[in-house]
Structures are given as C-alpha cells and as structure tokens.
Image: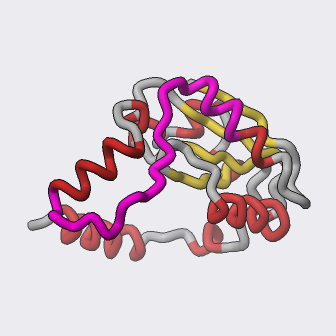
Amino acid sequence: MSIIDKALEANRTYAKDFNPTLGKHPAPKIVVVTCMDPRLSDLPGILGLPQADIDVIRTGGPAVTEDVLGELIVSNRVLGTTEMLLLNHTGCGFTTFTDEEMNAKLSASTGDASPAPMRFFSYKDPEENTRSRSRGSGRTPGLPKMSPCAA
C-alpha cells in the first residue's frame, strides 16, 4: 500500500468520527508563515498557542511571495487574524543550495533548460532572511507589520 493509499484510508476513518462543531468558520488570532519542513509541524508546542488560534501558511524558505501576501490578506481580512509571525528555522534545506545551483541541477537532470531560471528563494543566514522577509510584508497595504522569529 502506498503512502497516499494509507493517507486516504486514514482520512476515511477520521471522517467517520469527525466532530461537526470543528467545521465551523475558523477564527484564528495569529497567522504564521513558516517553512514546509515537517520538523515545524507542532506549531502549538513550538509557539505555546492553541491550534485553533493559529492560521498556518507553509512555504519553502519561508519565502514571502506574492501568493503568500495574498494568503496573508485573506487571513487578516476574512479570518480576522490580527498578528502575523514569520517563523524561520536553523537547518533549513533552502540554505544548502543557491538558486543558480538548483536551476543547473534541474536542467542537467531533466535535459531541459526551459524551466530555468526559476526563483527558489534560497538563502544562507536564517536570521537575516527572517528580518528581510518580514520587512517586505510591512509594505503591503492593509497588512499589519509581521514579527520575525528564527527558531
């Protein structure tokens, strides 16, 4: 059985016992932009906040792209979050390559240079990346200032 088959079976089991009161409109208090790294999966434990208070946006890096800015606006204007946190971490895979290296690797492994150059938002210093990414969100009309945090 594949991982997807196992996940689908687990979802069927979960759906049978799903508490319908959990299906009401969410009302998180904070939106957290964080890396897609699975080591950051326990955000309630990492941040000391209840799960229901956290709206999570996962992205590689974590890069605050135009798509992420759109999600932040929805989180703030539709879900009602009032605070934003950018959570970066040490040991991130995005520190292990440059965009140029990844583009070269992709082109070499596929024999196709057409997708390159892609922007992967690689970086070397988690703390500086967190500071620079959080500054960019403050320039978006309608969004509160994002607080940086490097774990």
Q: Which residues are magenta?
A: 109-133
57 in relation to 95, above or below: below
Main SS of the magenta part reads loop
Q: Indicate whether residue 62 is drawn in magenta.
A: no
- Name which residue lies at 71% across and 50% down: 31
**Residue at position x 53%, y 52% from top?**
58
Q: Position of residue 127 (x, y in %)?
A: 61, 23
Image quarter where the N terminus lies is bottom left
* Quadrant (top left/top right/bottom left/bottom right) for the C terminus: top right
Q: Quadrant of residue 55?
A: bottom right
Q: Residue at x 33, y 52 (%)?
A: 103
**Between residues 58 and 113, which one lies in front from this camera angle?**
113
Q: Is residue 42 left or right of residue 137?
A: left
Q: Left or right: 9 with respect to 11?
A: left
Image location of residue 91, percent across then percent down: 40, 26
- Which quadrant would residue 84 be assigned to in this image? top right
118 part of magenta stretch = yes
Q: Position of residue 69 (x, y in %)?
A: 71, 59
Nearest the eye: 28 or 62: 62
Q: Is residue 4 left or right of residue 93?
A: left
> How many numbered dots are placed on residues in this image?
0
User: Which x, y percent locates residue 21?
Assistant: 64, 70
Q: How is the image coloured?
A: secondary structure
